Image: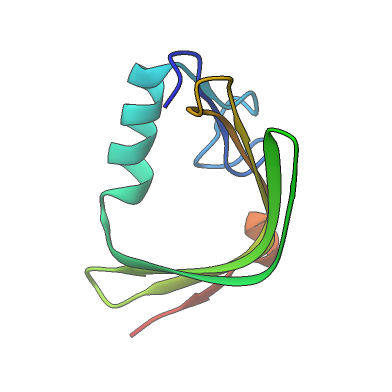
């Protein structure tokens, strides 16, 4: 991960991106992980399409996050990744909307 990592997941204002500007830097990325990813029991990635060009890639994905209480959240969107010249992740951007996510309770 690059020192200047930028995460916008999703792009725009959302509970995981309260300011709508994403998170910047490794410390903020660690906080993003602790707040949004670490509390899941599992996340399943289903790739539908993937494209790479230069130092970037874009993927049409369905992500299914399962939480300890059995609730699942299913998100379908486009996720882009950019790496720097050292091959480290520099940006992760998620094009999806919380309004379109599907939540299923156990």
Q: Quadrant of the C terminus?
A: bottom left
Q: Position of residue 81 (x, y in %)?
A: 62, 40
User: Residue at 41% of width from left, 27% of height from top?
Assistant: 1
Left or right: 17, with 77 as reference point: left
Examine the image and state in which quarter residue 61 appears: bottom right
Q: Is residue 8 above or below residue 52?
A: above
Q: Could you tell me if residue 96 is visible in this image?
A: no
Q: Is residue 84 above or below residue 7?
A: above
Camera-side residue of 55 and 70: 55
Q: Position of residue 33 (x, y in %)?
A: 34, 39
User: Residue at 58% of width from left, 27% of height from top?
Assistant: 22
Left or right: 92, with 33 as reference point: right
Q: Is residue 53 above or below residue 64?
A: above
Q: Position of residue 57 (x, y in %)?
A: 69, 46
Left or right: 16, with 76 as reference point: left
User: Residue at 36% of width from left, 75% of height from top?
Assistant: 71
Camera-side residue of 21 and 87: 87
User: Residue at 51% of width from left, 42% of height from top?
Assistant: 15
Q: Is residue 7 above or below residue 94?
A: above
């Amino acid at each position: 991960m690059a020192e200047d990592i930028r995460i916008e997941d999703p792009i725009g204002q959302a509970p995981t991106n309260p300011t709508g500007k994403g998170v910047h830097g490794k410390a903020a990325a660690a906080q993003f992980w602790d707040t949004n990813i670490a509390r899941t029991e599992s996340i399943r990635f289903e790739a539908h399409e993937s494209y790479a060009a230069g130092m970037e890639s874009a993927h049409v994905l369905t992500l299914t996050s399962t939480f300890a209480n059995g609730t699942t959240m299913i998100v379908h969107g486009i996720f882009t990744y950019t790496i720097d010249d050292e091959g480290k992740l520099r940006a992760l951007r998620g094009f999806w909307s919380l309004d379109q996510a599907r939540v299923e309770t156990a």
